[in-house]
Image (spheres, rainbow, N blue to C red):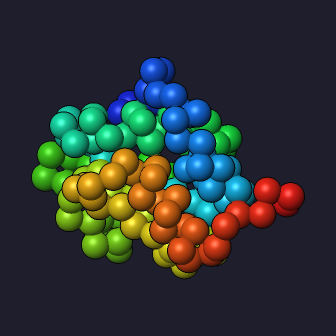
Amino acid sequence: MALETLDPNPVWVAEAYSDTVEVLEGYRDEVTYKIWGGDWCKDCRAKLPDFGAALAAAGVSDGHIEEYELDQDKQGPGVEEYDIEFIPTVVVERDGEELARFVEDEPVPIAVYLADKLEEALGPPNQAR
């Protein structure tokens, strides 16, 4: 089941986050975004639409996005395996290795946080790929 809260925010402005979008775009074919949330969750409703818009602006395909909808007890697929306690949680992996993790209350938007962590882990993306 897809998370409706991940539907892109139609008023999100990619140009305002051009550096973030550039990083996400640079790694769009290399990483997978695993997203845990719930349409009932106020934090998810507040944060995931902008993240969905950032992924769309970066051209990240559905094949690189895995959505896990949790119930109100925060139970669902992958919760135990990935030690999910708070939502939204987004784990970024490459070849099964966790590169970055956003958990609910980071002080910056999900896309900005993950782009910074991806650059720390992998360096600036090579746009000439």
Quadrant of the drawing holding the N terminus:
top left
Q: Position of residue 25 (x, y in %)?
A: 67, 50
Residue that extends furthest to the left in the rendered view of this protein = 73
Q: Is residue 18 left or right of residue 91?
A: right
Q: Is residue 101 left or right of residue 85?
A: right
Q: Position of residue 30 (x, y in %)?
A: 69, 63
Q: Is residue 128 left or right of residue 53?
A: right
Q: Number of numbered discs present?
A: 0
Asked whether 112 or 82 is in front, the reply is 112
Q: Position of residue 113 (x, y in %)?
A: 42, 58
Asked whether 98 or 80 is in front, the reply is 98
Residue found 55% across the figure and 50% down from its top: 20
Q: Is residue 36 placed above or below 16 in the rendered structure?
A: below
Quadrant of the drawing holding the C terminus:
bottom right
Residue that extends furthest to the top in the rendered view of this protein = 10
Residue found 67% across the figure and 67% down from its top: 124
Can I make out residue 101 in this image?
yes
Q: Is residue 14 placed above or below 102 in the rendered structure?
A: above
Can I make out residue 75 in this image?
no
Residue found 39% across the figure and 51% down from its top: 110
Q: Is residue 38 left or right of residue 51?
A: left
Asked whether 27 or 127 is in front, the reply is 127
Q: Is residue 75 placed above or below 50 in the rendered structure?
A: below
Q: Position of residue 7 (x, y in %)?
A: 45, 30
